[in-house]
Image: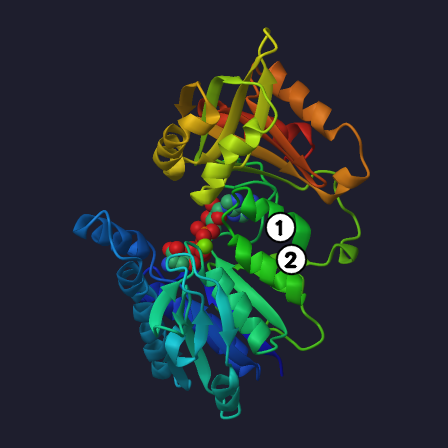
Amino acid sequence: MAVVVMKFGGTSVANVERIRNVARHVKREVDAGNKVCVVVSAMSGVTNQLVAYVREASLLHDAREYDAVVATGEQVTAGLLAIVLQSMGLQARSWQGWQVPITASAAHGSARITGIDGSEILRRFESDEVAVVTGFQGIEPERQRVATLGRGGSDTSAVAMAVALKADVCDIYTDVDGVYTTDPRIVAKAKRLPKISYEEMLEMASLGSKVLQTRSVELAMNHRMRVRVLSSFVAPEAMAPVRLGQLEDIGTVVCDEDEIVESQVVSGIAYVKDEAKVTLIKVEDKPGIAARIFGPLADANINVDMIVQSVTPDGKHTDMTFTVQATELPRTLETLKAAKSEIGEFEIQSSADVAKISVIGIGMRSHAGVAALMFKALSDKGINILAITTSEIKISVLIDAAYAELAVRTLHSIYGLDAD
Ligand code: ADP
Ligand code: ASP
Ligand code: MG
């Protein structure tokens, strides 16, 4: 027998009928003799609705009470799935974060999991009980308050449960049948990747491919937990159950890079539209100016992503362009205005109509010319690059948001990723 964690996202549990379908996936594994821990998200749309209620109640709300509200979506799904499983003759019990317990940091709204005691769930595995655990939440031990893990956090709950229970695999069931070369809802020619390395998946996730939450990939990579991304929309009985020692490579397997025999130079394209660009024009060009601009932003806990500095023709001034999360734009502008006495005179321009497009691939480590090809392809389409950042395995460019989809499609095709 194998220990399997199965996570089902919002669309997979969108209504009771879909929950029955999920229960059939679970039954398949139980019938094969596997021990199963299921991690569930809220029914599709529910978390958004809960967030909207909180904002309607008060824009300046208490973070602990925000969590008290938004964590409830998962509680409903876990209870409903346990009921359906029981009605199918299986032994099942729902578990909220505090009941497991899953402990989490006090950063309400984006808490980190700090520990999981899986002993009671493991004990109940012996009598063939299925555990249905609420994703997205834990308990902050000091104040004993519910803390949520950030949007998409049920993926992280699932990987953390898999690590705690020493599971053989963490299967993430969603509404697509794997990780694709780019978002299949944007590019019809996107191809499913049978395998992807932890490193590439980490970049894809953090650069906008929301199929897995970034922290879930980090956690899987640190613990070398095997993660598969699968579709819950495939008929449950048509899929083979997990068998110990012979895990089928279906969907997309996120694994060590050495397991990938044939890798492409570029494996995927990701994009985000939620960044904003800020330019400080004509700042005095003197030593320490960058520290005086970015120091106050760091103190205000504002994450700066891309930075471009250009010297103006007079040689005495510089223009500094950088990006922040669009939601942080008002705070960024306020912080900069407040720091004017340290920075000196400057004019400021900002825009949220920008998109960041990234090409990702471990093959870039050993292949030259990937960036040049990207810049040429974008220029051929008349797309202007506003900022560039690179790492060993990715190149990101900032462009006008209106061209985002054209850029993704163009790059997808130029790097040979289009399906035939
Ligand atoms: P769930 O509710 O199951 O957690 P999500 O909506 O969070 O599902 O993630 C699945 C979605 O991720 C897909 O519907 C797809 O549109 C999107 N997505 C973005 N980039 C990719 C990619 N590279 N491969 C697969 N799906 C992607
Ligand atoms: N329900 C939460 C959200 O919508 C967590 C998740 O689905 O992973 O963000
Ligand atoms: Mg998700």
- Closer-to-camera residue (390/333): 333
Residue 201 numbered mark, or none:
1
Q: What is the tally of numbered marks visible in this picture?
A: 2
Q: Is residue 413 above or below residue 170?
A: above
Sequence order check: which comes first, mark 1 or mark 2? 1
* Display coloring: rainbow
- Residue type at the position of mark 2: Val
Query: Which percent across, then down, holds residue 331?
Result: 36, 37
Residue furthest right in the image: 366
Q: Residues within 10 Å of mark 1 (few under 14, many from 20)?
A: many
Would residue 234 be seen by someone viewing this image from the given angle? no
Instruction: State how far apart marks 1 and 2 are (Cα).
Output: 7 Å
**Image point (38%, 82%), residue name:** 93
- Closer-to-camera residue (410/206): 206
Residue contact at pointers 1 and 2, CB within 8 angstroms: yes
In the picture, measured across the screen, residue 35 lies left or right of residue 367, that is: left
- Mark 2, secondary structure of its residue: strand
In the picture, measured across the screen, residue 343 lies left or right of residue 202, that is: left
